[in-house]
């Protein structure tokens, strides 16, 4: 009896209460303030100095996502990370969570594993990707937190340049911080999409000094915000004004700089189904500089003669893949199939899939009335078929944009994830 009383007293004084199984008693708060030494650069074959957590409150278990680099181990009971890394790993954020029955606290642990000479060798990520763009004009609260489990990469849109290579102030920085934080806490890789008027890019890219200034400013932004990569969304370089050549010069410099700093580079590009200066404005050489290419396979009202009112038909996706892979030489591992989460009407006006479903649209078909107009979109059946095609011929899907999708059971991202067999 005395032993039991003593145990209860110790639990009360030292741990603010205990219950069977090591869990905190009711009323005890969730752990908070988790942190580790950060950032961390390790070397293949060399044992690391244990990383020990600092945290407030009672912790019953520690977990991490994604999995730590090969050779490193997280002790689920103590939160200590130890071991000897065995493979080179690009800089990545590993979200460690300290949990009890009341709640949890998470910390983004940054780890890079260099080769045996201490120098980093950039290793591209060739895993299957599900990418979403989040425009600055959307409220982060409008996208359910569970949706972040359905994506692997998120780009905040947009950061815009000036002709001299300087950057304009990022729109809605509070939203940016909220979205990036939500994505990180769900193990999503985060990046910034760089876009703007084509005339600005044409002028900027034509000047070597301006190109270098832009690249330096983009890298500084990425480092300042601890981002994983950059998406270049120049719509579009053309052969008619020489920007096909200067685009390549810009992409090469940006790629070299980002890869030297363990960051990835993607590009949003034309579907290339229309012959002309835009399709020819992207040189095959660029493919070698870019980690993955987001094919914008939409906004093609009238292209598919069998479905002329549909702006993003399945046939258009197939044709785009044929051109990019068979003519331009885009490899499967860099091919990302673009899927719109919006529809267009005969006047080429757009409406989000979310709004179309709210107006009574059927998610299983590809058209719905909104007001007095019929809009044509990709419903869940078409999205599932495109997801299968992306798995067969590509290495991911991309959606413009995150908000336009619904939060419910008829979500397009949910349909894609279910078809691909992903858990979320």
Image: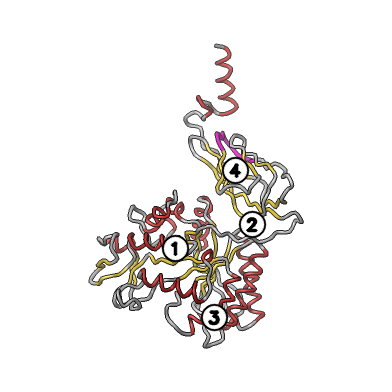
Q: Is 58 contained in the magenta span?
A: yes
Front tag of 1 and 4: 1
Image spot of residue 171 (x, y percent): 50, 67
Mark 1 or 2: in front is 1
Disc on the earlier residue, 1 or 4: 4
Q: Disc 4 versus disc 3: distance between alpha carbons? A: 44 Å
Instruction: Tell me if residue 303 comes above or below residue 351 in the rendering.
Output: below
Residue 1 image offset from top left, x and y in percent: 54, 11
- Badge 4, how many Cα within 10 Å: few under 14, some, many 20+? some
Quadrant in which residue 14 is drawn: top right
Seen from the viewer's position, the closer of residues 195 and 374 is 374
- Tag of residue 390: 1
- For marks 2 and 4, the one nearer the N-term is 4
Residue designated by label 2: 90
- What is the CA distance from the residue labelled 1 to the residue labelled 3? 33 Å
The span from disc 1 to disc 4 (Cα, nearest Å) is: 39 Å
């Amino acid at each position: 009896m005395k032993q039991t009383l003593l145990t209860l007293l110790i639990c009360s004084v030292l741990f603010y209460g205990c219950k069977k199984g090591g869990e905190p008693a009711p009323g005890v708060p969730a752990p908070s303030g988790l942190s580790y030494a950060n950032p961390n650069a390790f070397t293949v074959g060399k044992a690391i100095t244990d990383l020990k957590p600092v945290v407030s409150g009672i912790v019953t278990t520690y977990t991490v996502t994604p999995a730590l680099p090969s050779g490193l181990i997280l002790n689920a009971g103590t939160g200590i990370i130890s071991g000897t890394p065995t493979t080179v790993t690009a800089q990545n954020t590993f979200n460690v969570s300290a949990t009890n029955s009341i709640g949890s606290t998470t910390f983004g642990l940054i780890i890079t594993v260099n080769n045996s000479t201490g120098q980093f060798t950039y290793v591209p990520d060739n895993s299957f990707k599900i990418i979403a763009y989040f425009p600055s004009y959307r409220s982060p609260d409008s996208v359910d937190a569970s949706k972040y489990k359905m994506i692997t990469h998120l780009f905040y849109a947009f950061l815009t340049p000036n002709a001299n290579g300087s950057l304009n102030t990022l729109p809605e920085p509070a939203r940016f911080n909220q979205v990036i934080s939500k994505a990180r806490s769900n193990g999503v890789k985060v990046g910034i999409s760089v876009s703007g008027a084509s005339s600005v890019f044409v002028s900027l890219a034509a000047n070597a000094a301006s190109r270098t200034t832009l690249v330096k400013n983009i890298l500084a932004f990425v480092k300042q915000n601890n981002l994983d990569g950059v998406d270049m969304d120049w719509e579009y370089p053309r052969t008619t004004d020489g920007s096909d050549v200067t685009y390549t010069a810009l992409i090469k410099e940006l790629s070299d700089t980002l890869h030297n700093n363990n960051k990835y580079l993607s590009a949003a590009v034309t579907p290339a189904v229309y012959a002309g200066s835009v399709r020819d404005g992207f040189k095959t050489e660029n493919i070698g500089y870019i980690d993955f290419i987001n094919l914008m396979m939409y906004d093609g009202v009238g292209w598919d003669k069998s479905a002329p009112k549909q702006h993003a038909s399945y046939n258009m996706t197939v044709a785009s893949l044929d051109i990019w892979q068979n003519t331009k030489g885009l490899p499967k591992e860099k091919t990302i199939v673009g899927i719109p989460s919006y529809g267009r009407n005969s006047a080429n006006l757009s409406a989000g899939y979310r709004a179309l479903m709210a107006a009574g649209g059927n998610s299983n078909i590809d058209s719905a009335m909104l007001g007095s107009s019929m809009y044509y979109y990709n419903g869940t059946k078409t999205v599932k078929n495109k997801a299968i095609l992306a798995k067969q011929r590509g290495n991911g899907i991309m959606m413009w944009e995150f908000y336009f999708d619904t939060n419910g059971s008829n979500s397009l991202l949910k349909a894609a994830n279910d078809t691909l067999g992903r858990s979320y």
